Image: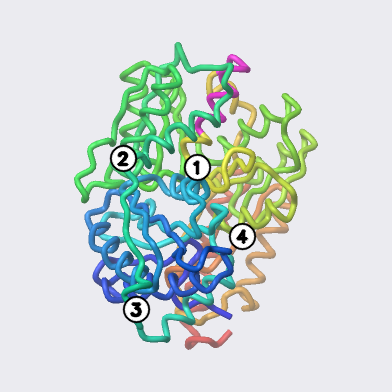
Amino acid sequence: MTKKFFGTDGVRGRVGEYPITPEFIMHLGYSAGKVIAAADWHLSRDENPGVLIGKDTRISGYLLESALQAGLIAAGVDVYLAGPIPTPAVAYLTRALRLQAGIVISASHNPFEDNGIKFFSSHGNKLEDKVEFAIEAGLENPIVTMPSMKLGKAKRIDDAAGRYIEFCKNSFPSDLNLRGLKLVVDCAHGASYHTAPHVFHELGADVVSIGVEPDGKNINDGYGATATANLQEAVKSHNADFGIALDGDGDRLMMVGSDGRLYDGDHILYVIAKHRHMMGTLKGGVVGTSMTNLAFENKMMEMGIPFTRSKVGDRYVMEKMLQEGSQLGGENSGHIICLDRHTTGDGIVAALQVLHAACVDKRILSQSASDLMLYPQVLLNVTITKGVDCSSHNLIQEVVAAAGAEFNGRGRVLLRPSGTEPVLRIMVEGEDDQRVRYWADTIAQVVREVTQALPPGVM
């Protein structure tokens, strides 16, 4: 079965364009509310199920919050409004307040014109597929408002940010502090603007904050994990020890060393895994994705750390971690999951794990990550006709096989259709940058020729 609206991270799109319209979002809230209300929560007869709603700083959050709230209340669900807080804060507070679900209004690293809805279970995890299917099925039914006696109510959570700040601080060892460290913290003008700087400051660091002036329209605009140039310059100009870049909803992390060099999710995951392995605290193996650099996998092998790949998407990383009994996993895009600290990816918590390693090992980021030399990696997107299966065409298989034969285990080719766009993502990596680029361009050209020559669905 294929979901119609839910992608790998909820429902997302351009505001005002279906499905991100007030009418649909209200219906989505109603359907989700009915699914939640139908579950066996062991609530008293007069007690409604409760759902927490948090959002990032997009101006459209006001619109979608009201629509979502109306749908949930019509379904007989009590709503707890947390205001602008990071996505992982919603996961934490849903558990802490013993609520039945958490909802985030955010489009993560996308521009402000986009927005979306993603859900957490009562345990602080992304929803299982069967629950998302049930919500989609409910969208076929009309909204039938509950009798007035059974309508939900709304309440604002005034201390949401403060509770989350304390949670993050508690993920850092109580016998350590960050005194003597100077950090530049970039919050992407997003949901972490009033939490992340406080976490690091209250742990003792000298904090320079950037990207902390949201106006509803500047989220991710030139700042944050997907636009790190300003952070890199600020780290050098302030002579800082580390730079920390979060994305718009606070679940992604990129870091910058004192020399201004950028470190991605593979580097961050490596530093945490290596430190825990040396300290004997790494339980289970490490989970990456199909996009995790081959050099990372080789390093895990050298250290004797089991390594497993999942599909791209933090929900799939989580699924694989639970299957493998791993506590550590992540993506090169910056989603880092430390299951012994949180139930979901958390940029602040992940940064604290890197800083923990720095405090204990007395090493700066460039030293901690110096022995992980990532292979050159080229990622190209080729537009394809919707419904065309590129993976089974003989010419495409032949050119991919030729590249694989040349790499001979010292490189990889990955073809992956996008889940949100009519494009095929072509990833090639290996030790030789020129050969990597050659094969990426060659494969992309073959894909273009094949897809242009055949009608939709014919392969």
Residue under label 3, please give it.
Answer: 147
Would you say the magenta stretch is mainly helix, strand or loop?
A: helix
Badge 4 or badge 3: first in the primary sequence: 3
Badge 1 or badge 4: first in the primary sequence: 4
Q: Which mark is residue 355?
A: none
Compared with residue 399, is residue 222 higher up or lower down, i.e. above or below? above
The part of the image, by quadrant, that contains residue 234 is top left
Residue under label 1, please give it.
Answer: 346
* Residue numbers of the magenta segment: 351-363
Which amino acid lies under the numbered mark 1 shown in the image of this protein? Asp
Q: CA distance from mark 3 to mark 1?
A: 40 Å
Label 3 vs label 1, nearer the camera: 3
Residue under label 2, please give it.
Answer: 223
Quarter of the C terminus within the rendering: bottom right
Residue at horizontal 49 percent and vertical 55 percent from the top: 99
| Residue 355 shown in magenta | yes
Which amino acid lies under the numbered mark 3 shown in the image of this protein? Pro
Label 1 vs label 4, nearer the camera: 1
Badge 3 or badge 1: first in the primary sequence: 3
Front residue of 167/8: it is 167
- Give the x, y percent position of residue 425: 51, 63
Contact (CB < 8 A) between labels 4 and 3? Answer: no
Label 2 vs label 3, nearer the camera: 3
Compared with residue 119, is residue 131 higher up or lower down, i.e. above or below? below
Q: CA distance from mark 4 to mark 2?
A: 28 Å
Q: Which mark is residue 311?
A: 4
Q: Residues within 10 Å of mark 3 (few under 14, many from 20)?
A: few
Residue at horizontal 27 percent and vertical 72 percent from the top: 21
Q: Residues within 10 Å of mark 2 (few under 14, many from 20)?
A: many
Q: Residues within 10 Å of mark 1 (few under 14, many from 20)?
A: many
